[in-house]
Structure formats: structure tokens, C-alpha cells
Image (cartoon, grey):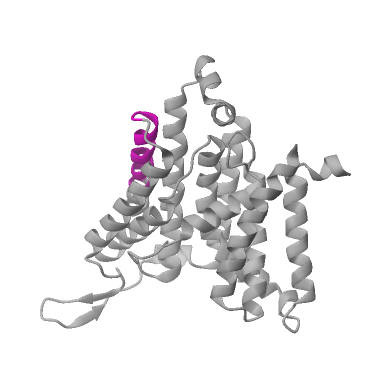
Amino acid sequence: MKSWFRHPFARAMAALALVLLLGFIFNADGAFFKWGTHSDMYRAISVYGILACGMTMVIIIGGIDLGVGSILGLSAVLFSLLAIRQGWPPWMAIPATLMAGAVCGLAAGGLIARFRVQPFIATLAMMVFARGLAKWISGGQKISTVIQKANGDFMNVPVPAVFDQLGAKILHGNLAVVTVIFLISIMVCWIILTKLRWGRFMYAIGGNEEAARLSGIPVWAMKLLAYGLSGLFCAVAGICQAAQELQGDPEAGVSYELTAIAIVVIGGTSLAGGRGGIGLTLLGALTIGYLEKILSINAVGEAARLMLTGVIIVGAVLFQRMRK
């Protein structure tokens, strides 16, 4: 029993089960037992979960990405600017936003892989740069359907159909489109990490980078790939964020990187690299999502929620040491 509990999947399942038990006990007069509570939680955690998909691959190679929240904000602003203000069709606005996110990720990855800048420093620089770029291209204002004309008057422009489509719910209102996108992101990461040699290379680099290099694995290319994919998922999350809020906010995504890291760590992926998986990240997202929802329906203040999340992150890291 003890050896079984040392498995990361078992610990992640135990953490999720404990949070669900809390929901059963503190159910807010039965609110926890309503499907709407669960579907709202899935929708709320999806954007964070998409960020965590990219973060999982970065952490597996032994890195960290502090820029995901800022790249999300930049992507939300860019997508809104192109779709709302410039009137670009979705088939142009979406690829352009995805490319911008990927370029940001590749830039941070290039600093790490080519110039050997520490991941913390490189992604911290990207966090500041992307946030500044988002504020610059938006003029420090939210990009919404309300536009100020030259004479000072305001006018409303129609919400692009793609915003309504991405922010909608399907299956008779029981499942949000953004949740479906999150599940697709999980599947893409699962294929990369388990079915492609890129995944094996990432695990090898995270386990022992020098041994991986001597084995002929293109370490620099894999780091570029991991950070580039992280930037790509940030753009996906930014598009979803803009669609849900019907605007591009240059302040969107502030501190989201902390939640994304928490999801990955609570799931059981090792911060040391070389261990973990996207299935664990899914469990971590459910754990964080349900914890936040249970605290919310029980009217627990934001300050207490943030402090509790910090304690849980530390506990999860200490809990990982039980694997040996």
C-alpha cells in the first residue's frame, strides 16, 4: 500500500478525492451537488489548464515559464484588435495570434537554449516585455466593441461571431466550448509526450541534460520546441479569454503563471524535470478548480483562498519527496 501511494498518479488522485470530500461536507446547502456548479468550474479552470499544458512540457525538460500570463494578455489584446477593430476574419486573426504567441515562446526558448540564460531570468524578461507590448499596442486601454470616434463620441461595433462561438456552451448548455478546447489541448500534449520521440527527448533532457546531449538528442531544439509550444498554448488561452470577456484586456493573465505552475506541481510533475505527465496535469487542474469552487460557494474571501493555495503548493512539493 505504501509503495502504491508513492506513485505520482496515486497521490494526485488522493488529493483530488480529498478536495471532493470537502465539497461533499461543505456543500453550501446542496450547491455542490448541482451540475451547474461543476460545469462552471470546468469553464473557469479551462484557461488556466490550457496554460498548464504548455507549462507541463517546460517543467518536464527542467525549465520554468514565468511569461505565460503576460503572453496570454498580449494574445487577448492582439486577437481583439485584429477581430474587432481591424475586422479580420477568424481564419486570419486566429493564426496570426497563435503565431505571435509561439514567437514569444521561441524568443524565451532561444535565450535559454542558445545563450544559456537561466529559465527564470529569460522568462521573467519575457513576462515584462510581453506585458509592456500588450499595453503599447492597446494604448493601455481595453480593446472592446466600444470605439471612440475622432469627435469624441462613442459607438458600438458588433461582436464578431467567433467571440460568440468560442464563448458559447454546447450540449444544451452543459459544456463550454473553452472546456472542449482545454480537453483538445490535453490530448495534443498527451500525443507529443507519449507517442512522439519529441516526448522521449524532453523526458531525457529533464532527467539528465548532459547525458541527453551525449546521446545525440538535440537539446537546444527540444528546448525551443517546449517553450514555443508553451507560447502557442498561451495564445490559445488568450483567444479563449478574450472570447469569454468580449474584449482584450492588457492586464489579463496577471499572476496566471502561478496558478499554471500550481496545477502542474499539485498534479505531481516534478519541478526537477524528467518526471510527470499531462494526465497528472489534468488531475491537478481538477484539484485546483474544485478547491477554488468549493471555497467560492462557501463565501471564503480571496485573501484566504490565495494563502491556502500557497500552502497547498508547498505541501505538494514536499509531498513529491515521498516517491523514493
Q: What residue is rendered at 47% in x and 59% in y?
A: 256
Task: Please determine whether, in this image, residue 44 is positioned above or below residue 268.
Answer: below
Q: Quadrant of residue 76?
A: bottom left
Taking the magenta stretch, the answer to whether it contains residue 4 is no
Task: Please determine whether, in this image, residue 66 is positioned above or below residue 158.
Answer: above
Q: What residue is rendered at 34% in x and 48% in y?
A: 126
* Residue 170 visible in the current orientation: no
Q: Nearer the viewer, residue 312 or 60?
A: 312
In the picture as drawn, the residue positioned furthest to the right comes out as 1
In percent of width and height, residue 78 lies at 31, 57
Taking the magenta stretch, the answer to whether it contains residue 112 is yes
Q: Which residues are magenta?
A: 99-115
Q: Main secondary structure of the magenta part?
A: helix
Q: What residue is rendered at 58% in x and 38% in y?
A: 272
* Residue 123 visible in the current orientation: yes
Q: Is residue 303 left or right of residue 174?
A: left
In percent of width and height, residue 147 lies at 23, 75
Q: What residue is rendered at 43% in x and 27% in y?
A: 221
In the picture as drawn, the residue positioned furthest to the left comes out as 151
